Structures are given as C-alpha cells and as structure tokens.
Image (spheres, rainbow, N blue to C red):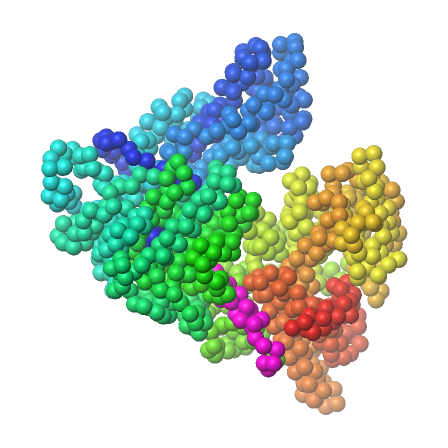
C-alpha cells in the first residue's frame, strides 16, 4: 500500500532515510553474492566527519597553504600544538569563541613561521560550503546501511561558528544520533565521547563499527571494544565496511535492499516464467538477480534483473488477507487503462494470477528510470525549483482527475456516489478487523465522521495514495514521468486525493513516516502552503473551493491510522513486508490524534457558521455523542472516560480527569503527586516559619535539596508546552491540557512550583528565551535557568502609570555610544530580592514616537549591572513573600550591551504577549490546586471539631459551604481545562475568550472557597499554621497581578457582543 512504503525506519522512534533518490538506469552487472557475518552481528555504524564524510582539515589546509604561500604543514602543526590544552582542542570542546580561537591560533602560526598568517581566511575556507561537502559515495553508503535496518551516527570533533551554530555541514536526518564535541564539552580520543555515542545509539561496543582517519581516535575506540576501520580514502574504506556488514554499499539500485527472509520468492519457477514471457528476448540469460524495494510494505515490490531486462514485480503478501485488500489485479487494470488515456504511468507487461509460480498473484512492469523525491521539503533545491515540482505534481493530479472514465473503460472500476461514506465504512471495518487495543481517538472518529459527510461529491478516478514520493520525475526538468502505487485506486471524490496529497503539510519535519513541513516556513522554501496548493488545484480544475477542507484532512489522517494499524496486525503474523512494520502500531494513535484535531477545527467552523437566532446553548466538546460512564474511586471524582478511553493522549481530546491522560503523562502525574505528598507537605510548616524568621531572605536549604531530588526523578521543567519546544530540548513536551492537570497538583502547595522549576516569573522568562533568544542569550541565561542554578525577574509594572495597559510604561531605553542606557522606576518586581536572581527582563520604551505597539523593547539586564537600586520590598497583606519578594526598584543610567536586546527595538509588546503564551493560564491552573487543597483541609477540619453539641460536618451552613465549594471548583476547573484545550487545538488567539473568562472566574472562585474554609477554621485560619492565609492573599493579588478583573470582563463582553 503506497502510503505504507514510507514507513520503513529500521529503529523506532523518529528516524528516517535518504533525502532524495535517483532511480537512474544501472548497467547490467552481477554484484558479488554477499555473506553476512552473522545475524544481528552489527547494529550501528559510526562515522567521523572530517576525513571520512567531508574533506579532512589537513587536505583543506594543504591547498590553502599553497595558494597563500604559507610553508606546507604550518596549519596542521599549529592545530596539534598544545595537545588537549591547545587552542584547537579547546575550540572543539566549545571553550572558546571563534574570535578567541583565531586570535590565539593566528599567534601560534605566526610565531612558527615568523610571519603573519591570515588564519581567518583559512577558517573561512574550512567552513565554506564549497569545500565542506559530503562525499556522495558516503551518502549512498549511509542510505544503504539504513535501508538494511542498521543505525547510523556521526561522532565529530567540531566547533561553533560565529553565528552560534555548530559546524556540521551534513544532513542531520541521515543519522539516528549526532554527537558533537563542542556541545558535549569533550573531544575524541577521550573515551567519554564514544560512550555518549554508544549510549544514545543503545548499542554495545561490539555491535558497532567506527570509521575515522586518525590513528589515536581509532585506538581509543578499539580499546572500548568497538570495531574500527581506518579511512585513507572513501572507496577502500567502504570495501572494508562491506566485508564487515556482509552487503554491498555501492553501485546498487537505489532504495533497494536484500530480500527479507519472510519475503523470499521461488526464483527457479520465476525464472522459468520470465523466459516463457519474454521469449527470444531472454534467450541469452545471466543469473536472475532479485532485490526488494524498501517501500511497498503492503504489496511487496521487487527489482528483477534477467539478461538485459530490468523489471519491477509487485505481488500480494503471503498468508490469509482481508477481503478486497492487496488487489494487484486492479492495479494492473488501472495502469493499463490510464496508459491509453495519456496519464503518465509505468508500462505493464503481464498479470499472473497463477499462485503456483511464486505463491501469490503478481504483475510485471518495466523499470522506469527517473527521480523520486522522498522529502516534502525537497532539500538542496532552490525555492523556484521546489515550486515547479509542486506545480507539476498538482498538474498531473488534475490530469488524473480529468480522465473520461467512460472512454477509458473504467465505468465499473468502482461505485458511483457516496464515496466518502463507503470509505469511512471500509476503513472502519478494516480497522476493526486489525484492532489490537482500543485507540480513543479512533473511537470518536468512527462516530464523528459519518455525521459530517460532504453533501456533494464529484466522481472521478482517484489514486487513493497520491503523494510526492509516489511520483517519478524527469531528472532534467519538473515533469512527472510516472505515477506509482495504484493499490487504493477506485472511483470516488477527487478532493480526498488533494487532502491526502497535503498530509505532509501538517506533519513535523522529524515525523518518522514522512518528513513533513508543519514546523518549516513553506513560503520561504518556495513550497505552496496546503491552502495555496488546494486553490491551485481548484483553479486548474475550474471548480469552487470546498469549505469543509478540515473534514477531508480528518478523513485522510483517519485512513492513515487504519492503514498503520493493519500493517501492525500483519506484522504480528509475519505477513508485512516491512522489516519494522511492527512499529507502526505505535503510530496509529498519533495519526488518529491528528485526525481528531482536524475534526475539532471542522466543528468550530460549523459552529461559527450557525445563525445567531439559534439557541445560545453551546457544546464545547466535539466528542461522538455517546454517554461516557462516571468513575467513582472514593477520592476526587470528576466526569471521566471509560477504561477504553484512558489511553487518550491526543491534544484533540478535552481530558477532564488525570486517569484519562496517556500512560506516560498519567505516570508523571502520579509520581508528581507522590513526591508532593511525601516530601513537600511534611516540610511546609518549616518553610512558613522560615519566611517569618530573620533568615527569611536566604533561600531555605530544604527547597534546594528537594530541587535536586525532583530533578533526579525526572520531575523538572514540566511547563514548556510542546508547541514551544517541539523537539523536547528543554522540557517534558506536554500539551497545555496535560500540563493543566500537573499544574493543579503543584498549586496545592505554594512551595511546590519552585521545587519542580515551574514557578513564575522564571517560567515566563524561560519561555521568552526559548521563543526569542539568540544562541548566546540562551547559553548565558536559559540554560542556567533550566538547570535551576539562577532565578530571574520581569520588570514592567510602574508606580506612575496604569500598568495594566503595557503601552503606558514610561521607563526609557536609549542607545548611546554603542550600548543601551535604561532609566526608570519599577515596582512589584517579583523575585528581584532573591540572592539567586541574576537576570532582570526589562521592558521600556525605545521610541516614544513609533506606533503605539512598537514603542517598547525588551532587554536582558544582568542584576550585577551598576545602577540597579532596590528601594524596598513590598508586602501583600503584610506578607513579604521571601526570599524572592516583590521589589520597588530604580534603574538609573544602567548600561546594557546591545546584544542583550531581545528580537530588536520595537518588539517589546509582541514579546510580552508571546511571553504570556501558555503561561497566561498557569496561575489559573494553580488556583484550582489552591482551592482543592483548601477544600480538603476544610473537610478534615469540620470532621474533627464539635460546636453546639454536634460535629461541624453536620451543621447545615457548613454542609452548604462544602457543596458550594465543590461546585465552584469543578465549574472553574472545566473552564480552565477547556481554555487549555482550545489553546492546543485552535491556538492562543482562538482561545482568547476562554482565557479571559478563566482569568475572571478562577481568582474569584478561589477567594470564595478559601474564605469559606477560613470561616470553618475560625481564628486558626488566619495565622500561618495552615496555608489558608497565604492562599487567600495570593488569590486576591492575582485579581490584579494576572490582569485586573475589569479588563477581563471587558474583553469577554466585547467578544460576546461580536458573536
């Protein structure tokens, strides 16, 4: 099945293959019959970079020295001078900047030859794209190694470039693991860097092979038990590597591999059949050569060489198959018919339905030389070339959909009308037949899709799996030579092909099935966006654009999920042709989640289109309309999913119970809960006492100790959302909705957020640096903040103006003598009194005459900069909140380097809004935790106290207060979760109304709940023996600090009036 041939990564998760493959005609030759050194002998091949994958520095230096009349060997001699402590090694460990290295290195070289040496020129030559190009023979070998199921890694001694990026002129996606000395702080031949590489590859030393051109590096690897190959030249090195691996690495048919054991076919009977078919053309016959294409997991596909014939054989897979699936007979028919209609397809030769030949029916076609592009981003091309490729793809799709089905003899190739309905039924049936466990998103889609079918559907020939890498292009121009993989073709709605063609637009670039475009700038690449591509199609077909695009995308991803589930089920029975198809089961849930995201968006579109005269009742949940059972477990009980739904991890699902979180997040939740109950609650009184002591401005040791413990248990930096940190470089990669549940837990203790490095204002400042910081800014500030080594503050509020309107701020930032000078009076700067606070994120005006929202700028100000004067700590209802506190501060002519500016002048308001990002509802999440803890304390209190002859728990007013609090908390929680959910599925802008509502609701709700508890506690609720007084103070403060209630009410009202 065409889509499935993308899924061929040998090691799950997140690996992918070659960038683009040239299927060029290869002259007939008989490769040696390789003998593997043993099953599973090797699992990984590790490459050095310089001298192995790209030219060695010594080669570049030799040419450069000759051109600049520098004595031969000067550069290399200088590079090795000083050994581990020399500038070159320190530079490669990331201990020196480029400027520092060139200065010291230049001095070394000049002293050697008693003459100035322009080392900057050498460095430019060394790092130029003209010289730092990967050897093509190595690229081919890497692709081959990965096609055979082995992992690859690059282990490089490299350095930082002036722009802050590391020097690695390779396509990183060729490798499962990339280890760079400048990032690790350790260089070869240090054994530690080899161990890092092996650990990340998850292989033993004896299971790996290391290629390098330097003896001392090879010796260090060999001492660890790694097999080594000395690289003097690429060709000879690859010959040795072939001997190790037992399969060829050069001059092979691209995108092929040895036939897998479960996919072997009888060669004698096939050879006899071919001689009969080809007749005299096969009279002169050499050995029959058979390779398997790495694509074609559904219908196995083979490269067949016999004499001077190069053919492609496509067959049904072995074993019992689903009804109507894998119909190679239909593929043969459609290719034949379309060839006569002028559609570019391969030339078919024969259909053999005699299963006695190779075990199943098959058909043959001529091998079509050309070029297949495996990556949607078309790496290595110019924007104009990419646009031309996408235009050609769009045109051939229009050509296919314009075929006269009657003239082509295809009227009975499929049913007419109701295509989508039948497809939903078919794929639902296929999914049910291969279901191995319940996938909640699939359950919702199975019920949602039939309820939202398109009202109008055209009928044309549809490919069913139309994608860029199912096309063979002319290598010389943007022309499609052949459309491949017709297994899913039928008569149906052509828009399903268009949507399917756009799957890659909505997938990330590191997605394991196919590298997508969602995190790339398609416009900059020259690639039409999905919307532009759809409009291009509609324009060429002369049809109006459909409004329900999101439905077609939901259906397309639903179908992909069903396909992947089928591959997984077949892999369990040994029927799938993919060596790693068993891993596809792990992706079915992911793709079904994407499908549900589009279903949610389609629901919003339909809702927005409803007439205003309809009833005002609103449904915020687009789940299938069935009742979900309630789970009662004796503790906090909300409306929750059934057990079948508890695996839900999709951001397309409004998860209202921790038990419905995905298993990894649910585990994280429970570990966090245990940590707080075991380690945080027991020391809260000590911490409250510390805040009242003379030592209150010194961070308590208990907090610092628990930070280290939390970090060691993986309960650290949970706040950064997946949308901000998609590669999970800095955080846990949670959605806003998932983090809402964890944030509520942390909100139950005022001290917990800091212990897990999830406390304001650091969270907002870290998110600011992740989103907008330069490499240098991240290195200096973000990394220490992420490690919890320093704290930070955010300086915006000013005493002279209404700072709820950020455009009112008056503090100035002026440029003078190459630096910025800031002056201003700020107050309520949370955390600035903390001795660990080393960074102040300062917002001021750079241009008072610019447009209103472009006057402000943001600077990163080191706290030890002269001119910063803390006037006093400010108290909240008498509470100073040490050790961080809330300070009133003067900035008097504070000089800040220009490179401390974030983004650039005039971007402050934009940054302030972005800084709020997901953090804009973190306070509301924590307020739910305040309230839940408060209610728990209240229930415990009233059960243990007696007044007027009976327990407080039996007093009518107390019972009424408990009931009100439970209702208040659950209502507010649902609104918080809904806001987080909308931020995930529709974005912060679309969620603005719900964010404003929860900021208006949550603090007021918390105040009511806490006030009721204080009444139940009596005077004991007013002192520091419980957290109630502090809860009350901060809940009241947040009605201002998180934006005044009045602002939120105004926002809600204005948006409601526009509905």
Q: Please name whichever residue, 426 or 533, is drawn nearer the observer in this view of the structure.
A: 533
**Which quarter shows the N terminus?**
bottom left
> Residue 291, relative to residue 5: is it above or below?
above
Q: Quadrant of residue 956?
A: bottom right
Residue at 23%, 30% in the rendered image: 29
Q: Please name whichever residue, 628 or 426, is drawn nearer the observer in this view of the structure.
A: 426
Can you see residue 436? no
632 on left or right of 983: left
Q: Please name whichever residue, 284 or 743, is drawn nearer the observer in this view of the structure.
A: 284
Q: Position of residue 420 (x, y in %)?
A: 38, 67
Q: Quadrant of residue 1040?
A: bottom right
Q: Please name whichever residue, 992 or 241, is drawn nearer the observer in this view of the structure.
A: 992
Q: Position of residue 726 (x, y in %)?
A: 55, 51
- The answer to whether residue 598 is magenta is yes
672 on left or right of 172: right
> Residue 989, relative to residue 905: is it above or below?
below
Residue at 41%, 72% in the rendered image: 450
Q: What span is colored magenta in the figure?
A: 588-615
840 on left or right of 435: right
**Which quarter shows the C terminus?**
bottom right
Q: Quadrant of residue 613?
A: bottom right
- The answer to whether residue 656 is magenta is no
Q: Main secondary structure of the magenta part?
A: helix
Can you see residue 785? yes
Q: Position of residue 11 (x, y in %)?
A: 39, 46
């Amino acid at each position: 099945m065409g889509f499935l041939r993308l899924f061929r990564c040998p090691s799950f998760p997140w690996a992918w293959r070659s960038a683009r493959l040239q299927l060029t005609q290869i002259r007939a030759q008989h490769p040696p019959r390789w003998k593997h050194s043993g099953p599973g002998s090797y699992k990984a091949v590790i490459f050095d970079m310089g001298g192995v994958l790209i030219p060695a520095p010594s080669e570049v230096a030799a040419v450069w020295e000759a051109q600049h009349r520098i004595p031969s060997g000067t550069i290399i001699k200088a590079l090795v001078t000083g050994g581990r402590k020399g500038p070159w090694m320190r530079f490669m460990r990331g201990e020196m900047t480029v400027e520092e290295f060139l200065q010291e290195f230049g001095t070394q070289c000049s002293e050697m030859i008693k003459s100035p040496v322009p080392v900057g020129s050498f460095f430019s030559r060394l790092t130029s794209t003209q010289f730092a190009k990967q050897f093509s023979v190595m690229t081919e070998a890497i692709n081959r190694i990965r096609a055979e199921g082995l992992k690859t890694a690059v282990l490089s001694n490299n350095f930082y470039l002036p722009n802050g990026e590391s020097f690695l002129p390779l396509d990183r996606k060729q490798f499962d693991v990339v280890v760079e000395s400048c990032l690790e702080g350790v260089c070869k031949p240090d054994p530690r860097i080899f161990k890092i590489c092996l650990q990340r590859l998850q292989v033993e030393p004896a299971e790996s092979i290391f290629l390098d051109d330097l003896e001392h590096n090879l010796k260090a690897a060999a001492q660890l038990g790694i097999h080594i190959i000395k690289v003097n030249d690429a060709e000879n090195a690859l010959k040795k590597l072939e001997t190790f691996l037992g399969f060829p690495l050069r001059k092979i048919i691209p995108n092929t591999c040895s036939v897998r054991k479960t996919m072997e076919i009888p060669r004698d009977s096939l050879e006899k059949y071919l001689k009969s078919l080809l007749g005299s053309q096969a009279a002169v016959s050499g050995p029959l050569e058979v390779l398997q294409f790495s694509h074609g997991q559904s219908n196995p596909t083979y490269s067949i060489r016999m004499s001077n014939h190069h053919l492609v054989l496509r067959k049904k897979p072995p074993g019992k198959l689903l009804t109507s699936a894998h119909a190679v007979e239909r593929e043969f028919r459609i290719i034949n018919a379309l060839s006569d209609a002028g559609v570019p397809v391969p030339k078919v030769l024969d259909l053999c339905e005699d299963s006695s030949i190779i075990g199943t029916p098959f058909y043959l076609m001529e091998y079509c030389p050309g070029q297949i592009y495996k990556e949607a981003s078309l790496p290595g091309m110019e924007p104009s070339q990419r646009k031309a490729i996408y235009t050609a793809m769009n045109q051939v799709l229009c050509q296919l959909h314009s075929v006269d089905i009657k003239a082509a003899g295809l009227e009975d190739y499929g049913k007419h009308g109701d295509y989508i309905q039948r497809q939903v039924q078919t794929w639902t049936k296929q999914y049910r037949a291969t279901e191995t466990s319940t996938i909640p998103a699939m359950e919702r889609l199975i019920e949602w899709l039939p309820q939202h079918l398109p009202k109008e559907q055209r009928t044309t020939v549809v490919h069913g799996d139309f994608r860029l890498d199912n096309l063979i292009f002319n290598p010389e121009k943007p022309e499609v030579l052949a459309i491949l993989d017709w297994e899913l073709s039928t008569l149906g709605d052509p828009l399903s092909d268009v949507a399917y063609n756009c799957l890659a637009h909505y997938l990330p670039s590191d997605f394991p099935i196919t590298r997508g475009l969602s995190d790339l700038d398609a416009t900059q690449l020259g690639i039409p966006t999905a919307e532009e591509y759809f409009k291009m199609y509609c324009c060429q077909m002369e049809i109006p654009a459909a409004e329900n695009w999101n439905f077609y995308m939901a259906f397309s991803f639903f179908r992909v999920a069903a396909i992947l589930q089928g591959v997984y089920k077949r892999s369990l029975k040994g029927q799938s042709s993919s060596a790693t198809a068993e891993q596809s089961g792990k992706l079915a849930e992911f793709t079904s989640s994407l499908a549900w995201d589009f279903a949610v968006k389609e629901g919003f579109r339909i809702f927005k289109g409803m007439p205003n005269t309809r009833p005002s009742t609103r449904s915020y949940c687009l789940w299938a309309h069935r009742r979900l059972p309630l789970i009662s477990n004796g503790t906090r009980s909300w409306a929750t999913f059934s057990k079948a739904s508890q695996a839900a991890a999709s951001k397309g699902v409004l998860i209202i119970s921790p038990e419905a979180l995905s298993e990894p997040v649910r585990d994280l939740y429970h570990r966090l809960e245990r940590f707080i109950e075991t380690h945080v609650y027991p020391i809260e009184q000590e911490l409250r006492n510390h805040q009242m002591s003379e030592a209150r401005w010194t961070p308590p040791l208990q907090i610092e100790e628990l930070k280290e413990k939390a970090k060691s248990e993986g309960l650290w930096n949970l706040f950064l959302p997946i949308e901000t940190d998609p590669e999970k470089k800095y955080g846990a990669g949670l959605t806003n909705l998932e983090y809402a549940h964890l944030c509520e837990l942390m909100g139950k203790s005022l001290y917990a957020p800091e212990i897990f490095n999830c406390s304001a204002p650091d969270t907002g400042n870290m998110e600011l640096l992740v989103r907008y910081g330069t490499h240098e800014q991240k290195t200096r500030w973000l990394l220490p903040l992420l490690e919890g080594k320093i704290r930070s503050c955010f300086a915006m509020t000013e005493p002279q103006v209404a700072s709820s309107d950020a455009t009112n701020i008056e503090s100035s930032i002026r440029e003078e003598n190459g630096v910025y000078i800031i002056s201003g009076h700020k107050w309520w700067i949370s955390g600035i009194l903390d001795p660990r606070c080393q960074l102040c994120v300062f917002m001021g005006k750079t241009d008072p005459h610019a447009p209103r929202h472009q006057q402000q700028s943001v600077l990163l100000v080191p706290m030890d900069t002269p001119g910063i004067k803390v006037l006093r700590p400010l108290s909240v209802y008498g509470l100073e909140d040490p050790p961080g506190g809330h300070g009133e501060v003067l900035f008097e002519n504070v000089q800040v380097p220009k490179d401390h500016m974030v983004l650039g002048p005039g971007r402050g308001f934009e940054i302030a809004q972005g800084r709020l990002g997901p953090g804009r509802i973190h306070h509301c999440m924590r307020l739910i935790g305040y309230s839940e803890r408060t209610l728990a304390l209240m229930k415990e209190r009233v059960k243990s106290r007696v007044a007027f002859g009976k327990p407080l728990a039996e007093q009518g007013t107390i019972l009424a207060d408990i009931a009100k609090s439970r209702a208040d908390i659950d209502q507010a929680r649902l609104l918080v979760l809904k806001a987080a959910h909308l931020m995930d599925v529709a974005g912060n802008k679309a969620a603005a109304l719900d964010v404003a509502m929860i900021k208006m609701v949550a603090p007021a709700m918390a105040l009511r709940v806490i006030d009721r508890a204080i009444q139940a506690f009596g005077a004991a609720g007013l002192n520091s023996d419980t957290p109630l007084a502090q809860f009350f103070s901060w809940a009241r403060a947040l009605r201002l600090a998180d934006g005044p209630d009045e602002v939120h009410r105004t926002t809600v009202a204005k948006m409601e009036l526009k509905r």
